[in-house]
Image (cartoon, rainbow, N blue to C red):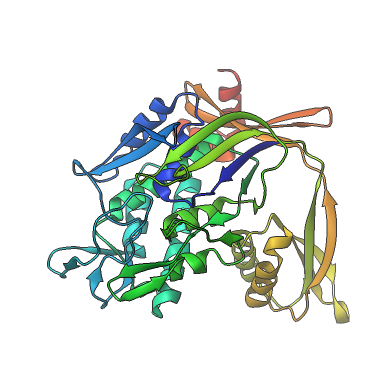
Amino acid sequence: MKTLYLDCGMGAAGDMLAAALLELLPEPQAFLDSLNALGIPGVHFQAEPSVKCGITGTHMAVTVDGAEEESLDHHEHPHGHEHLHDHEHLHDHEHPHDHEHSHGHHHHSGMHDIEHIVRDHLPLPQPVQDDILAVYGLIAEAESRAHGVPVSQIHFHEVGTMDAVADVTAVCLLMRELAPDEVVVSPVHVGSGQVHCAHGILPVPAPATAYILRDVPIYGGSVRGELCTPTGAALLKHFATRFGPMPAMRTEAIGYGMGKKDFEAANCVRAMLGETERHGDTVVELSCNLDDMTAEAIGFAMERLFEGGALEVYTVPATMKKSRPGVVLTVLCRETDKDAVVSLLFRHTTTIGVREAICRRYVLDRRLETAETSCGPVRRKISTGYGVTREKYEYEDLARIAREKGVSLREAEALVHNN
C-alpha cells in the first residue's frame, strides 16, 4: 500500500509541507512550472535549497507581485476587529507585530472571495478545488470559534492572502499528484510558551490552531514559540488518514521542507513515501432505518456524510412497520470518525437510533497514474493484490472527452484505450 508519512517533530506550516512533498516528485521543476502556469494572481513559486543542522532540503519561496511575503501564515480576523497581525511564527516570520493597518490600506477577503478565486479563476480539477476550500473551511471555523463570531464574518487579510492560497493550492495539488493510499502523520509538536499579538498575549498553540488540532495528538517542548500554524494544522487535519508513529514501510523517497529560522533541531517537516504491507483494517458500520424521508433528503444526507469522513454510504430497500416502504442507510467509517458520523446521521436524517457493528475489511492496493493521450491527460486507477489486477479510467476524464468529442462514455473509453 502506498503510504505517505509526515514527521512533524518541528511542527508544520503550509510552505514547509509544500516543499517536503515537492521533494518526493521525480521531476519537481516540471511541477513548479505547472504551479506557476495556474495564474494565481501575482504569485510566483520558486524552490530554493536550504540547509538546517547539516540537512539539505527545500524552502518553498512564494513571491506576490515580485516580493516574498514576510507576513504571517494566517491572517484571519473577524470584521470589526483591529487589523493587526496576530501571531509570530517561528518557522519563517521575523517581523514585529505592532503594525496597525487601516481599512483604507488593505482589502480583506472572506470565504466567498476565496471560493471565487478557487472556483472561477484557477484551472484546477474539481477534487482539488474541493480540498482547498475544505482546508480554508477548517481555518475559518477555527477562527470563528476563537473570536466568537459567525464564519461569514471571518475575513482573511490581504497581506498573506495570496501566498496562503498558493501554499494550500500547492499542497492539495501535490497530494493529488502523489496519490497515497494513506497518510500517516506523527504527533504534532506545537511549540511552547506565549506569543504576542495585537489583542494581548496568547498561549501556544494559538486558539485557532488548538481548535483545529482537537482530537489530534500534540505536544509542547523546549522550543519557545509557535511551531504549528493554523494553515499547517488544517492541511494535516484534512489529509491525514490517521495520526501516530511511523509504520513499518519500505521507503522510496524522502523530502525535507525547511522553515527559515534556525533552532538546535532541524527546522523542517520530513515527508517519507513508501510501501507498507496491507493486512486488512477495521472499520465501523453504522446503520439506521428510514421510512419518512424523501429521496432528495436522503441524497443530501449522504453528501454530508461523505464530507464528514464516511468511507462508504449506501441504502438498501426495506419493508418497515405497518408494511411501509423504507430504506436501511448504512455508513462505513474509521473509528476516529465515528462520533462525527453519528452526529451527522442524527442531524441530517429522521432516525432516532443508530446501530453499530465492527467490521474487518480487505482491500486492494490502489494507485493513480496519468497518461498523456491525444485527448489530453487521462487518469487511470490501478488496483492490485491477492493475485488480482484491475484498471479503470477516471469517470471525470472520460466524461470530459465524451463532451468534447460528442460521443458516448463507452466510445470515449475506446478512444483512450486505442491511443
Q: Position of residue 110 (x, y in %)?
A: 32, 65
Residue 157 seen anywhere in this rendered image of the structure: yes
Q: Quadrant of the C terminus?
A: top right
- Residue at left offset 50%, top offset 24%: 26
Along the horizontal axis of the image, is 225 left or right of 79? right
Q: Position of residue 316 (x, y in %)?
A: 80, 61
- Residue at left offset 68%, top offset 72%: 345
Residue lying furthest top in this view? 419
Quarter of the image for residue 292 reads bottom right
Q: Is residue 49 above or below residue 218?
A: above
Count of numbered tags: 0
Q: Position of residue 94 (x, y in %)?
A: 28, 53
Q: Is residue 241 above or below residue 337?
A: above
Closer to us: 257 or 241: 257
Q: Is residue 87 above or below residue 187?
A: below
Q: Quadrant of the N terminus?
A: top right
Closer to us: 121 or 322: 121
- Residue at left offset 60%, top offset 61%: 216
Q: Position of residue 355 (x, y in %)?
A: 82, 71
Along the horizontal axis of the image, is 241 left or right of 287? left
